[in-house]
Image (spheres, helix red, strand yellow):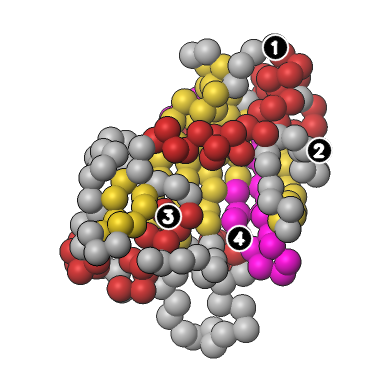
Amino acid sequence: MDAGTLKAGDKIPPTRFLMQQFNLSDNAVYRTIALLKAEGYVHGQQGKGVFVRDRRALISGTRRILIGITQPDETIHHRHSVRVEAPEWVAGILGEGECVNRAQTVQRGDVVLQASQSWVSLEVAAVVTEVDEPEACDPSWQAVYQQRSGQTVTVASRTVDARIATPQDRADLGLGEGRDEDRDENHALLVMRSVYVTGDTVIGVGEGVYAPGHPLALS
């Protein structure tokens, strides 16, 4: 959708088609569509199907990313802030070399809703020293950088995809806990990647992985 494959108003292909194309179960497809609805990317029309929403409806989502808004019953748990060499896919966007990798989860009660990581340039770290500290930035590092540097931070692009949970995803989101360890759990997850820029300069890359099983309406 963000890549332009589907346009606003386009109808999402039928469940059976998606099952065959991506080799997923019907439950995995239902969960993925539910997550896309929750993020405002698609909406259902009774008796007609599921359709792509206008990107302008996602403004509130962008605002949440930049200011770090959480719902009243949500909490952020910081996992780590470490200096690393940018992974290959991040280096292709942010540039090769050292950056700050930050990881955190968002929880509602004991349930992990989202696991996210960001890779922040050292230029930002020089202004927002908090990104190197082992705690969450409140507001977000993007908002702090914008305030201190006087440069506007925008989301240059957002791409959304779905994937079957990797072992790391399962560990981060607590999937499979309390279950038979030998049981095959093919959880379909929504993955959102964002690129943050000031002008034409990329200053950070983010990835959010959203857990299945939210109390979402599928209709």
Label 4: how many Cα within 10 Å (few below 14, some 14–19, many 20+): many
- In three-dimensional space, the C-alpha distance between marks 1 and 2, rounded to whole angstroms, equals 22 Å
Query: What stretch of residues is rendered in magenta?
Result: 92-116
Residue behind mark 3: 37
Looking at the rendered image, the quarter that the C terminus falls into is bottom left
Name the mark nearer the viewer: 4 or 2. 4
Residue behind mark 4: 113
- In three-dimensional space, the C-alpha distance between marks 1 and 3, rounded to whole angstroms, equals 35 Å
- In three-dimensional space, the C-alpha distance between marks 3 and 4, rounded to whole angstroms, equals 15 Å
Location of residue 2 by image quarter: top left
Residue behind mark 2: 133
Q: Amino acid at mark 4?
A: Leu
**Label 1: element kind:** loop
Q: Amino acid at mark 1?
A: Gly
Q: Which comes sooner in the sequence, label 1 or label 2?
A: 2
Q: Amino acid at mark 2?
A: Glu
Q: Is residue 84 magenta?
A: no
- In three-dimensional space, the C-alpha distance between marks 1 and 4, rounded to whole angstroms, equals 33 Å
Left or right: 169 with respect to 145?
A: left
**Label 2: element kind:** loop
Q: Residue at x 51, y 34 (%)?
A: 59
Residue behind mark 1: 150
